Amino acid sequence: MTPAATLSPAAIAADSNVSRTYALLGGEAAIRAPIRNAIEAHDVLARGLPAASLLHLVDRVGFLEHGDALMKAVGVSLRTVQRRRADPTPTRLSTEQSNRTWRFAAILAEAIAVLGTQAAAEDWMNRPAIGLDNRRPVDLLATAAGAEAVAEYLTRLDYGVYA
């Protein structure tokens, strides 16, 4: 990887978010491959994340086990997670499930960075936001357009532009 001194601020921020996302998904212990940048993330997602990374995320993000939050955020039912947890055979998520899992973890990682703590980020994900037409961020993650709106709103919050 290029030394930080030669990277642009945007590249440093992107690599930081990749690192935070990787950590939320269990890091090397769960993913079994290093991910230091978006290209390495792409390669892992194209092969499919290990189910262990989703299980790690669900274990660490409390609200995912309530209601339909997991289905909205990642597109996987709680029952599917329970079956994967009970299955001793290591399995991989589909490319679509991997992408949605990564996208959710990336947005949560960014929310943690903007809001300061995971508890604040989780609370924010579950409350209607004025800048999102009074919708809960977690409810918008089912589509790429909704996830983009949430990510853009987080950027606005980071820069102090709330509406």
Image: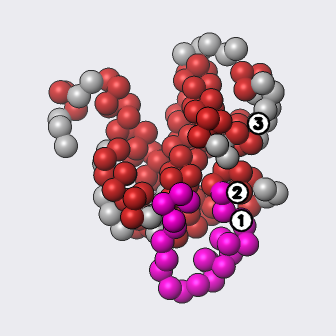
Asked if residue 22 can be seen in this view, the reply is yes
Res. 122 in view = no
Which sits earlier in the primary sequence, circle 2 or circle 3? 2
Q: Please give the count of numbered marks on the rendered protein.
A: 3
Which residue is nearer to you in this view: 135 or 8? 135
Place of residue 31 in the rendered image (x, y in percent of width and height, measured from the top left): 41, 65
The numbered mark, 1 or 3, whose residue comes first in the sequence reads: 1
Quarter of the figure with the N terminus: top left
Mark 2 lies on a secondary structure that is: helix
Q: Which mark is residue 136?
A: 3
Vertical comparison of 139 with 88: above or below? above
Q: Secondary structure at mark 3?
A: loop
Q: Over which residues does the magenta segment extend?
A: 75-97
Q: Are marks 2 and 3 in contact (CB under 8 Å)?
A: no
Q: CA distance from mark 2 to mark 3?
A: 14 Å
Residue positioned most to the bottom: 88
Residue at position x 71%, y 57% in the image = 71
Q: Residues within 10 Å of mark 3 (few under 14, many from 20)?
A: some
Percent position of residue 130, x then y: 77, 22
| Distance between the alpha carbons at the discs numbered 1 and 3 | 19 Å
The amino acid type found where label 2 is placed reads Leu
Residue denoted by label 2:
70
* Earlier sequence position, callout 2 versus callout 1: 2
